[in-house]
Each structure stands twice: as C-alpha cells, then as structure tokens.
Image (cartoon, helix red, strand yellow):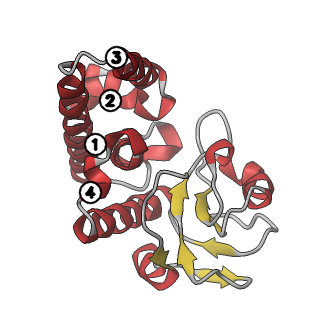
C-alpha cells in the first residue's frame, strides 16, 4: 500500500491465517495487506474476499501482476503463490490484527504518522471485518464483529483528533489536505458499514 509500514516475516502472517494449503513459493516477508487489487503494492498479500457484488478471486491475477506477494483465498484461483484458507474474511481480520498490532508496537511512530495512512488502512481492515454484509459476514460471530467495529472506530477517532489539531495550525496546505482526507472518509466503501448507524450497535 505504500504507507511506510514495516514488512513482517511471512511466517508470522501464516500463523495467523492457519492455512489449509500453500501453493508456490512465498516471499520471505509481507509488505502489507490488501483486499482491493487496485490498491495492491509490491509485496502486499491480496485477500480475495467474496462480496455481494464481486468475487475477489477474479482479481487475483491482476493483484499478482501489480506485485502482490501472495493471494489468500477460499477457492483455488489458479494463481501462485496462493494461500488457501477456510474463511478469507476471518483470516484477514486475524492477519490485520497481527500485522498492524506488531507494527504499531514495534514502532509507535507508524500510528502517529497520520498522513502516511497506516492507521487508516488498519481501521479499514477492521471495519471490513466488523461490518461484512451477506457472505462477507458469515465467518465472524456478533461478538467478533462488534470488537472489530470498536477497533476501527478507535483508530479513526485517533486519526480525526490528529487532523483537528493539524487544522488548528492554520496552514492552508494542511487545511486542504485535511478536507480532502475527510471527504475520502465519507465515500470510502471500506467504511460503509461504519456509516450505517445500525452497524454500530
């Protein structure tokens, strides 16, 4: 994703994923996690989530072409490296918890560097895990989804507090950056579930 976060050893992520099988040679490290092939960066692992409108497995080849280190999927995609799991959404939640939790613990500056977007990406992963619709929601029980929604909101509130403080500085360039960022929050599909009041119970 290009947000300045630390790479993590692939073994750490595999432990969280509890894979059914692994095909092909995995890279030694994981640069990031992504569920959107349009935003995959070199070394990111792409999670092929099955949603209401699109099946992420269809975009596995596109993600690998952009430099993804591996595809994490429930159904075979015919692409390698591929990590097969029982539930891709639950696996993504576990992987995100380990990846971002370890990164923020090892270097708290990653979370505090709000413009880099690391904590925002973590919040998006948590929101997706906590606010899945239809098939997306099958793998997590109500307690788990609620926990991920709370985590997403906590990270977003921390980012918002930073942006508010930045506005107080009265820098025109910063003001424009803040407004652009907050407008993105309003339309980012990853946060759609959090914008629905019923999803926040």
Q: Secondary structure at mark 3?
A: helix
Does the residue at mark 4 contact the one at mark 2 (Cβ under 8 Å)?
A: no
**Residue 20: quadrant of the picture:** bottom right
Q: Earlier in the sequence, mark 1 or mark 4?
A: 4
- Depicted 36 relative to depicted 85: above or below: above
Does the residue at mark 3 contact the one at mark 2 (Cβ under 8 Å)?
A: no
Q: Residue at x 28, y 42 (%)?
A: 152
Marks 1/2: CA–CA distance? 9 Å
Q: Name the residue carrying label 1.
A: 152
Few, some or many residues within 10 Å of mark 1 (<14, 14–19, 20+)? many
Marks 1/4: CA–CA distance? 19 Å
Q: Is residue 73 visible?
A: no
Can you give x and y, in whole percent of width and height, for residue 54 in the image? 68, 38
Q: Name the residue carrying label 4.
A: 109
Few, some or many residues within 10 Å of mark 4 (<14, 14–19, 20+)? few
Marks 4/2: CA–CA distance? 26 Å
Q: Earlier in the sequence, mark 4 or mark 2?
A: 4
**Residue 4: quadrant of the picture:** bottom left
Can you give x and y, in whole percent of width and height, for residue 179 in the image? 38, 16
- Image disc number at residue 175: 3
Q: Is residue 58 left or right of residue 49?
A: right
Does the residue at mark 3 contact the one at mark 1 (Cβ under 8 Å)?
A: no
């Amino acid at each position: 994703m290009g947000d300045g976060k630390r790479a993590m050893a692939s073994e750490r992520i595999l432990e969280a994923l509890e894979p059914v099988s692994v095909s092909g040679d995995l890279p030694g490290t994981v640069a990031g996690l992504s569920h959107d092939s349009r935003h995959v960066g070199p070394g990111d692992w792409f999670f092929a989530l099955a949603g209401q409108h699109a099946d992420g497995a269809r975009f596995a080849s596109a993600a690998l072409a952009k430099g993804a280190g591996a595809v994490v999927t429930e159904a075979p995609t015919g692409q390698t490296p591929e990590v097969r799991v029982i539930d891709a959404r639950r696996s993504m939640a576990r992987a995100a918890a380990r990846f971002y939790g370890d990164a923020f613990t090892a270097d708290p500056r990653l979370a505090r560097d709000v413009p880099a977007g690391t904590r925002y990406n973590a919040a998006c992963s948590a929101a997706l895990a906590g606010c899945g619709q239809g098939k997306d929601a099958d793998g997590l029980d109500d307690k788990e989804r609620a926990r991920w929604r709370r985590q997403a909101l906590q990270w977003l509130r921390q980012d918002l507090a930073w942006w508010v403080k930045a506005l107080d500085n009265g820098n025109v360039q910063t003001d424009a950056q803040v407004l652009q960022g907050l407008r993105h929050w309003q339309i980012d599909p990853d946060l759609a579930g959090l914008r629905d009041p019923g999803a926040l119970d």
